[in-house]
Amino acid sequence: MARTKTKPVGRTPTKRKACELWLLSQLANGPSLAREILVLGVGSGWGWATVRRAKLNIGAQSFRKAEEWWWFDPKKFDPKKDSLPQQSTQAQKEAIALAQATKNVLESAPPISPAQTQPNIQPSTAFPVLLPVTSVPTKAAQENSSIPSESAQPLASSPPKKVPLPAIVPQAPKPEIPKPPNPPRHRPFHIWDSALTETRDALISSAGFADLYTMRLDIRFRQEQLRARGLLKEEAALNELLARINEALEKKKKAANLE
């Protein structure tokens, strides 16, 4: 069965044509940003896709490529063909005229001296050149300085005084704070563990069929682990326990058959 064409929902040719006329009327005053057109179109009741298709049908003349590149395919955009020269709006003309008038006023004003712009700055004062503090030593002074003075001689020969060191007071040993004992670790629970409260025989005799089968599987698994590790003595020690469990299973089976 051939696939039939579905009826367009929402974007009909009539609606698209009306949107194109509305878009042309919006662009009559001057170029607008594509985002502004989209927001205005959605606010006016047009769908996003309808406004976009109407814009594609009209062309990219009223939009700038640098800002609206996502509205159309850049490969199909020809700057010489699609872009128009920027039309200066009334607001741009007023701003240019205001800037020109301000420039003319500043150029026609008389020049201002630095004293008027900076009245608080005092003129720089010239300080006299200062002579060096150390004077040139004379020949007599050099001879006197080479001979050691009498007052300096006994100071140099006298031994330095010993400064008494502070007495070291031994610190009292700090009392050891007893640490809390570590809690005992829980031992792993095993069927063959001798730390059970009940004895093994009592545990085996009171167990049911499911418990006995579980015990036997557990012991066999333990024996495989010991055999893989090479602990053959430990593996043989579990044979006695395995024999007791098998004996208990046979007794359970006989008792069940008698009943």
Image: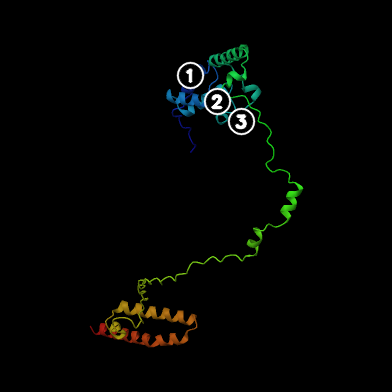
Q: Is residue 170 above or below residue 86?
A: below
Image quarter for residue 173?
Answer: bottom left
| Residue at the right extreme, as displayed | 139
Disc marking residue 7? none
Q: Which residue is mark 1?
A: 22
Residue designated by label 2:
56
Q: Amino acid at mark 3?
A: Pro
Secondary structure state at the residue bearing disc 3: helix
Query: Quick one: label 1 or label 2, which is nearer the N terminus?
Result: 1
- Residue 26 in the image, given as x and y percentages of width and height: 50, 18
Residue at the farthest top position: 108
Disc with the residue nearer the chain's start (1 vs 3): 1
> Could you tell me the amino acid type at mark 1?
Trp
Q: CA distance from mark 1 to mark 3?
A: 25 Å
Dot 3 crowding, Cα within 10 Å, few <14, some 14–19, many 20+: few
- Residue drawn where x is 60% and y is 19% of the image: 115
As drawn, which residue projects farthest toward the front?
150
Return the residue nearer the eye: 9 or 218.
218
Crowding near the residue tagged with mark 2, few <14, some 14–19, many ≥20 C-alpha atoms within 10 Å: some
Label 3: which residue? 74
What's the coloring here?
rainbow
Q: Quadrant of the C terminus?
A: bottom left
